[in-house]
Image (cartoon, rainbow, N blue to C red):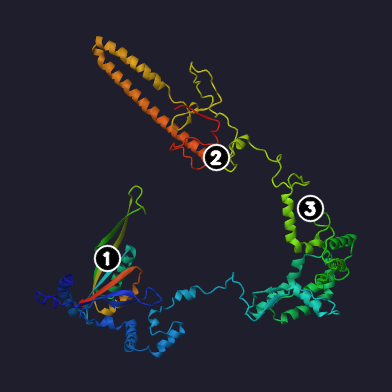
Amino acid sequence: MAGRGAGGGGRKTRNFATFRLFPRAGAADPNDRVFVRVDNNDYNVPGFADEDPFDSNFTADAADLHSFASGPLPEHVRREILELGLPDDGYNYLSHLRELRPAASAASSFVPNSTARPEPLPLDVKAYDASRVRVAPSADDLDEGKTMCKVAAKTAPLRRVQRALDPDVARLLDESDFSHGGSEDEGLEEDFVIMANQAEGDDEVEEEEEELGNGIFSDVEEEKEEEEFEDEPKPRVRRLLDEQFDLLALEEYGDSDDDDDDRGGRDGDYELPSEAIEELKLFCDQNGCVDEDYRTPADFVRGRLESTTADEVDESANVIQKCAEYAERYLNEPAEEKETVLVSESSDESEVWDCETIVSTYSNLDNHPGKIETPGNRRKRLPRVFPGETATTNDLIKLHGKEKLPVDYLPQRKRNGEKEKKVKPAEAFNAEKVKKEVHKETKEEKKARKAAVKEEKREARKAKKELKGLYKSETQKAQKVAAVTGPSSIRLIEACYGHCNSSTAMLTEGEQ
Amino acid sequence: MAAAALYGAGGAMKGGKLGMEGAVDMQLNRIRITLSSKNVKNLEKVCADLVKGAKAKELRVKGPVRIPTKVLHITTRKSPCGEGTNTWDRFEFRIHKRVIDLISSPEVVKQITSITIEPGVEVEVTIADV
């Protein structure tokens, strides 16, 4: 009613407000929507506009920002921006923030990554894995150098170290290792029964050592139980086979002869065996001379069979003189026959040459001659021997036509067409004779004649097509062969050249 | 909105009636809720909820008026190149629209619309004088 009262020319007063439901910007839940006014009429709806909490906040911030639009942002805003790690460049990045969805944090709690590598060490720390170090049971000879070598030899540098998260967890892990580690690694010893009986007495010792290990919350594990098991091989009776094996090992690998010592100690020793040392000394005395003389072919030529190593120093001094001598000798050797003739090429009997290759002097790179035989379809060949011909050279394949195809060996085309051609005109001729006599039959005869002509033309067309196709397929085949054997410039399908050089060397061209 | 004006004329009378009868006379407005969506199922569900909610609050509701659905067609060649038989894809995009009229105060409407939340349904509320 109020709307209707407006004047004719102008627009009716619009007394309505339109709100649309939009998802709140920056809200976690997409279903959290607010009404936003989408028109700009003067109508005010008190109910809708005021109750919007988002709007009020927004307007408060907006008011703040507008007041500071020209200047810097308020301090609390700036601090918050910096806390988030965003740059402090006068722009209010907080307007682009979005709340975290509640589902994200609740449902998907973080699960420790099973494939993660242990974190890398800090740069000023270096860790070594000393799990393979065998501490000698006897501590009498604590030569620092030797033990250092042993330790260094067996430890491996680590780049990443697994840090146990919880001391309880670490303790549990260590304990489990101790109980299962030794037996799993080494298997049951041969006299485990004795060991088990002995273990009752050694239990106390083991426990003490375990405690020690757990007390030190260390990153690197050492196999302490190895010490106990080290004693086991000793009580075992050494058999003849053991002695033999040790001897063999010594001979073969020249290891230190520490058979009597603990086997664990052998690994730590890195002294050379005495025999090797003696050899080396000998070598040093001889100043690097080898017993057997080294001869070059040049030595044979010049007739020098003594050791030349000693003369090397002298030779270098008068190289120019030597060169002059050789030059003279070269000039003055007209008919001298050398004893030793150095032949650079390989001997004749090792290579077998093809006569074709020799004749054509083509290299084997692009020439692959084979035995040329007449193609397989000899049976299809009609003996095209005319009475006038004298010599029927059956071994030659004659090429005819523009594309130089072996016509005799192609699949036969129908000969019937030709016969019909000869026959049909004769028939037609007879028909014409009859026609003059009997008029009634002319229609039928005409029909027959026309039909015959049509048939003949059809046959001719078919034959032509067939021949054309044949030619094309044959050229394709020939091109294929040429592609393999002959140079790539040969083109058969375009019928420019018409033959490939190698395989048609023996074939003659037919007359066009 | 000529339609609104016309409707307003009709509604005003009823509004007047209501005003005489009803004890609670908060500023009543004619409220038109337009719901539009791509899929009919959600839309119908929201409509039903709204109507149910409004009826529960004893409001005058004009049931969901179904505006004819607009079908937007996109017809494209299937082939990315021009080769081949000229096959065409015919895609369509259906927009369904429902209109619900209420006579109530805006606060009530706000409550009602906040309850029925369905993704993909666009809600537009027009408030006019009674």
In the rendered view, does A272 fall on the left or right side of A354? right
Three-letter amino acid code of the residue under disc 2: Thr
Residue at numbered disc 3? A302
Mark 2, Cα crowd under 10 Å, few <14 / some 14-19 / many 20+, is some
Residue at numbered disc 2? A485
Q: Quick check: marks 1 and 2 in contact, CB under 8 Å?
A: no
As rendered, which of A19 and A88 lies closer to the eye?
Answer: A88
Q: Secondary structure at mark 2?
A: helix
Mark 1–mark 3 Cα distance, whole angstroms, equals: 111 Å
Quadrant where the N terminus of chain A is found in the figure: bottom left
Question: Which residue occupies 76% across, 64% down?
Answer: A317
Is A240 located above or below residue B129 in the figure? above
In the rendered view, does A52 fall on the left or right side of A161? left
Question: Which residue occupies 34% across, 68% down?
Answer: B120
Three-letter amino acid code of the residue under disc 1: Lys
Tell me which chain the residue with mark 2 is part of. Answer: A
Quarter-wise, where is residue A127 in the image?
A: bottom right
Location of residue A405 in the rendering, given as x and y in whole percent from the top left corner: 48, 31
Mark 1, Cα crowd under 10 Å, few <14 / some 14-19 / many 20+, is many
Quarter-wise, where is residue A24 in the image?
A: bottom left
Residue at numbered disc 1? B97
Nearer the N terminus, badge 2 or badge 3? 3
Tell me which chain the residue with mark 1 is part of. Answer: B
Which of labels 2 and 3 is toward the front? 3
Is A145 located above or below residue B39 in the figure? below
As rendered, which of A15 and A271 lies closer to the eye?
Answer: A271
Q: Secondary structure at mark 1?
A: strand
Location of residue A197 in the rendering, given as x and y in whole percent from the top left corner: 84, 70
